[in-house]
Amino acid sequence: MGMDRNTLIGFGLIGALLITMFVINSKSRLAYEGEQKRIADSVAALKPAVDTNALRLDAAKADSLKLQQQQQLGFEQTVASAETVELKNELMTVSFSTKGAQPVKVVLNNYKKADGSQVVLQKGSFNEFSYTLLAGNNRTAQSDELFFTAQPVVVNADKSQTLTFTSKDSSGKELVHQYIMKPQEYMLDLNISFSGVPQLFTQNTVNFTWQTEAEQVEKDHKYELTQTHIAYNENGSFDFEYASSPDDIKFEKALNWVAVKQQFFAMGLIAKNKFNTASVNWLAPADSSQYITRAVTNASVVLPAANTAAIPLQFYYGPSDYNILKKYGNDMESMVPYGSGVFAFVKYINRHFLLPVFDFLQKHVASMGIVILLLTLLIRLITSPILYKSYLSGAKMKLLKPEVDALKAKYKDDQQAFGMEQMKLWRSAGVSPLGGCLPALLQIPIFMSLYYFFQSNIDLRGKSFLWSSDLSAYDSIYNLPFSIPFYGDHVSLFTITATLTSLLISIYSMSSMQDNNNPVMKYMPYVFPVLLLGVFNTLPSALTWYYTVSNTITLLLQIIIQKYIINHDKITAQMAENMKKPVKKSKMQERIEAMQESQKKLQEMKKNSTKK
């Protein structure tokens, strides 16, 4: 016994949704890359030749120039050279520069990049954190132009570490940057205090600039870019934008925090008392050998009318792990994309069902591949009643096929009359025409929740299973010397197994389908599995391994239910008994039949008027 037409439509809709998502993403990516190449070519054509000797000379003079500027500002500093100071806990190592009193390098101690090197979230000259200062004579300067004095690191009673930078002048103006690193924390506190506020800032407003460059961390640059977001919380409301296309945002309300969220790691700036105004812009390079994205955040804080003031801030440098981010509050866990867009509702399935079950399983099972297998078994067990209803509906529809064929022959010239009589037949037999379609549609939330879950769960990162070295990335058994359109430049074996098992389901279903003369219904189930090759080839191997297991279980359940559980004689007897009973029409059915009768009368009137 196979799937009925409505069941195939249901699964077809699932496939269409998935394929549509990937087609849209692919088109956007191609358009973006073309635009980036055009911009890069234009910039290269206009760029003058660079004198490398002059660059070396400028670099040698830079610190001396900064010292002169600092002396003009009035802040004391005798040595025009930057020193580096470190704070380190079990999770990360942060290097600070006395130039600007800012973080210049963040190393995550427990994470490796795809190439085996340590994950570094911030390094390079583009990264900076600074604010604007009044310099007198209608001039301004940036705090990262100043050389601060670093005080010795203080270890507090709670094992936290405090690092303080100061810069002051003879008139009493003073800048203090105090960083606090707690044990076992990815959050870094920054308390900035000022003395002489009216002389330091225009209208008591501090204008911050936070520049961040996200480097490639994962195996696939393009895929990591599609998973990179600019996330933010605007006055208590979370949202995000994809970083794969250059854009900018000017926030209309106060900003709680902003972050650059890569596939599995994030860099965030948090204002404990909110930023009064803020904007952010970002871009991504066309060349995959460069960074993933660059973002510039401009934000302001209005200080009270007093000589002294303080601003409490925080930096987050760490994994985009739902459980870790949730403990920091402020809706930061929403950075983990467990559902978005029209499928935003599936994040609740992921957060409150899949994630707790997944966490429980991985505590008791060593192999992550086996964890996915057990999770799949549980999901298929939960959805088996839906699957049973679908196959039961298919069995009923097939048993009614002779009567439907008779009606089709009787009303071959009147499709409307055929439709009405077919509905009456189904209703009298107690069969719903949507019995096969609705169960398939009800599986879409589970399907999409797993799609988001396996792309976003950092616990899969670096975990190997069978031939896959990293379940959070695609598995490759062979790298092609060229790229095939819509497929890629590698061969994913889990994608092949997912495709083959999907094809086996289609072959088994079509072998006993009651309406296999319709060309569309006949070939669509075979086309969809083939399309999976291109769609799934770059997806995480955890996802394609799940589909392989899920398809295998589905095929076995289909055979067991249809061969050994569904009693066709009992169903036939039940439908015959239903036909003897008077059928009570619902109000909706009465309205539909009334509309059909009206349309039938109108058609008859048109025919009669044509004959005259």
Image (tube, grey):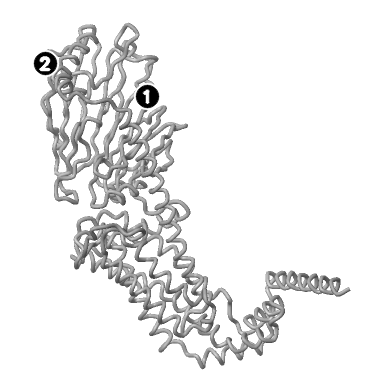
Instruction: Please tell me which residue is depicted at 41% across the width and 27% down the height of the picture.
Output: 276
Disc with the residue nearer the chain's start (1 vs 2) = 2
| Residue 250, quarter of the rendered image | top left
The image position of residue 581, as x and y in percent, is 66, 87
| Residue 611, quarter of the rendered image | bottom right
The residue lying furthest to the right in this view is 612
Instruction: Please tell me which residue is depicted at 13% across the width and 16% down the height of the picture.
Output: 80
Packing grade of label 2 (10 A; few <14, some 14-19, many >=20) is few
The image position of residue 483, as x and y in percent, is 29, 57
Distance from label 1 to label 2 (Cα)? 31 Å
The answer to whether 199 is drawn above or below residue 318 in the figure is above
The answer to whether 262 is drawn above or below residue 434 in the figure is above
The image position of residue 202, as x and y in percent, is 37, 14
| Residue 69, quarter of the rendered image | top left
In the image, 537 versus 206, the foreground residue is: 537
Q: Give the labeled residue for mark 1.
A: 301
Q: Is residue 257 visible?
A: no
Q: Are marks 1 and 2 in contact (CB under 8 Å)?
A: no
Q: Is residue 167 visible?
A: yes
Horizontal arrangement in the rendering, residue 610 relative to residue 573 (left or right) = right
Helix, strand or loop status at disc 1: strand
Count every numbered label the image shows and give the total. 2
The answer to whether 19 is drawn above or below residue 591 in the figure is above
Task: Identify the disc placed on residue 345.
Answer: none
Q: Give the labeled residue for mark 2.
A: 79
Q: Amino acid at mark 2?
A: Val
Q: Nearer the viewer, mark 1 or mark 2?
A: 2
Packing grade of label 1 (10 A; few <14, some 14-19, many >=20) is some
The image position of residue 501, as x and y in percent, is 34, 75
Instruction: Please tell me which residue is depicted at 39% across the width and 48% down the height of the picture.
Output: 30
Q: Amino acid at mark 1?
A: Val
